[in-house]
Every structure is written in structure tokens, then in C-alpha cells.
Amino acid sequence: MTDGDDDFASSPPLTELAQQMIYERTRPRPRKPTGFKKSEIPGSIASTRTLDRIESGTYRGMGLGKILELLDFYDTEHQQVDQIKRLVRAAKADDWCSVYSDAVDDKGWFYQQREDAASDLFFHSGFALPSLIHGEAYYERIVSTTEVHMAEVDGSQNPGFRLERRRRWIASERPAQLLIHQAALTIDLGPKADEIHADLRKMVTLPFADVRVIPFNVGRYDLMGYDMSLLEFDGGGESIVQVESSRGSGLIKADSARGKFFIDAYKRASAKSIPAEEFLR
């Protein structure tokens, strides 16, 4: 997403940093199941106003020392501290784009760990099966029809990453709704189409998976042209919206006007969909 949209935070690294700092403050702890309230953070570390600016993604001038003090108070794990330090440096860099490309570490390091922690998952995919339910045969089809391969520079594009991600989700039995446009199922799926459909039927039967299809006869709908994931959390944690389109991709504040647009558009698209079982008969 572009910086020019008012409802997005001022840059992707600031947005991602804000999400991580919110999570570190609010994550469950022994005897504090909803984490810390802002009023519980010592003023000698950060005022409520400073926390508001950090967690809204608008504090371009924040110092690394201030962030490290907060993370020390939150008792953040070392791996996460290192990741957040890289995001702070990316957010402060003049050419944040080149710095951020290194800071995200395997495209969506933060998103992936939040997906693993989410209590409810929602996905929309326009022209491909959602990556959460990719089977091996479908991934082979993607590789065989892709001329510019990203797997060499993006670890989330290799089959091992995707299949392990799917395995973790199935093992967790967390509820997920997946909206797929009919185009993703009627496009030529190649010589292993039967295997792909058989794998999808297996996914559809999972009791915690609600796989739905948006038929062609629905016509245009607001979410068309966007791939979207929405993560929701128990205990009042802030929802996360990630959107991909021809304009780019990024995290969006769930309670912003843009975030509310996408969440509402998802609900409307879901209401127009039909169970995948009906389509796959």
C-alpha cells in the first residue's frame, strides 16, 4: 500500500513496528492475561502520549533507546527484540524501502508469528487458492506456470514453508474461513487438477475450516482485486488486516477507516458466497 493513503500509517515499517509494540504490551502473562494497560507503564520509560504515538505508527522521531527500555519492561524475547530493532532502524531510514526489505525477514515474519497466535482466521483470495490450504500439487502448478520465481529471495514462497504452515494450522484446529472466487477453481489447473480438487475436498471437510466460493454470478463486489487476511485474537488483542493488490501490500490498522472498509467488504463478500462443498460436487 502507498504512503499517500491517509488511513495507512506513514510507512510499512512504522505500521509493523506499531503492531509489534501493541502486541508486546498486551500479550498474556502470568497473572496478567491481557498484558499491561498504558497507565501501568512507568512514566520514566514512556508517557501515555508517547505510547499512543508509537502504537499508532506516527512516531517517526522515536529513539531506539526508548523502544529498548519498553521491551525490557515487557520482558520481550531476544529474537523479537532483534527484529524490532531492525524495524526501528528501517522506520528512521531515509530510504526505508531498501532497509525494510531486510527487516521483514522472509516476507511477513511478524505476520506469520501473529497468524500462529490468532484465535480466528479469515482469508479472501481472488484468482488463486488461499496459501493456507495449498497442497503440494497446487504449489507445483504455481511453480510450473511462473516465469519469474521468487522462492530464491522469499522463503515464504517455497513448498516446505507453505506445507509446514498448513500443518501447524491443522494441528491447532483454529477456526478459519476462506473465501475463494470461482475464477480460482475454473482456471486451468493442469494435469494434476484432479489431485488438486481432491486435496481441496479434504480441506473442506475439516470441521474448523469454512471454505466458501464466490460465484461468477455475484458480479463485481468490493473486495474484488484484493487478497486479504484478517486475524482476530482472544483477550481483546488488536485485529490485524493484511491486504495485497496490484498497488502493493501491507498491514492496515484494523480500526482505521481503511481497515473498517476491508473488514466490512469481507463480511459482504462472505454473505454472497456459497459453501465450497456445493461447488465441488
Image (cartoon, rainbow, N blue to C red):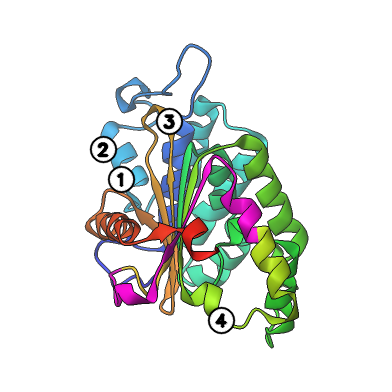
- Residue indicated by mark 2: 49
- Residue indicated by mark 3: 234
The answer for how far apart the CA atoms under marks 2 and 4 are is 51 Å
The answer for how far apart the CA atoms under marks 4 and 1 are is 46 Å
Tell me which segment is drawn in magenta. 200-222
- Residue indicated by mark 1: 53
Looking at numbered disc 4 in the image, what kind of residue is underneath it? Ile
What residue is rendered at 51% in x and 71% in y? 97
- Marks 2/1 in contact by CB < 8 Å: the verdict is yes
Q: Nearer the viewer, residue 258 or 138?
A: 138
Number of numbered discs visible in the structure rendering? 4
Looking at numbered disc 2 in the image, what kind of residue is underneath it? Arg
What residue is rendered at 47% in x and 60% in y? 278
Helix, strand, or loop for circle 2?
helix
| Disc assigned to residue 35 | none
What residue is rendered at 54% in x and 73% in y? 185
10 Å neighbourhood of mark 4: few (<14), some, or many (≥20)? few
The answer for how far apart the CA atoms under marks 2 and 1 are is 6 Å
The answer for how far apart the CA atoms under marks 2 and 3 are is 26 Å
Q: Residue 203, image x and y in percent? A: 61, 52
Looking at numbered disc 3 in the image, what kind of residue is underneath it? Asp
- The quarter of the picture where the N terminus appears is bottom left
- Marks 1/3 in contact by CB < 8 Å: the verdict is no
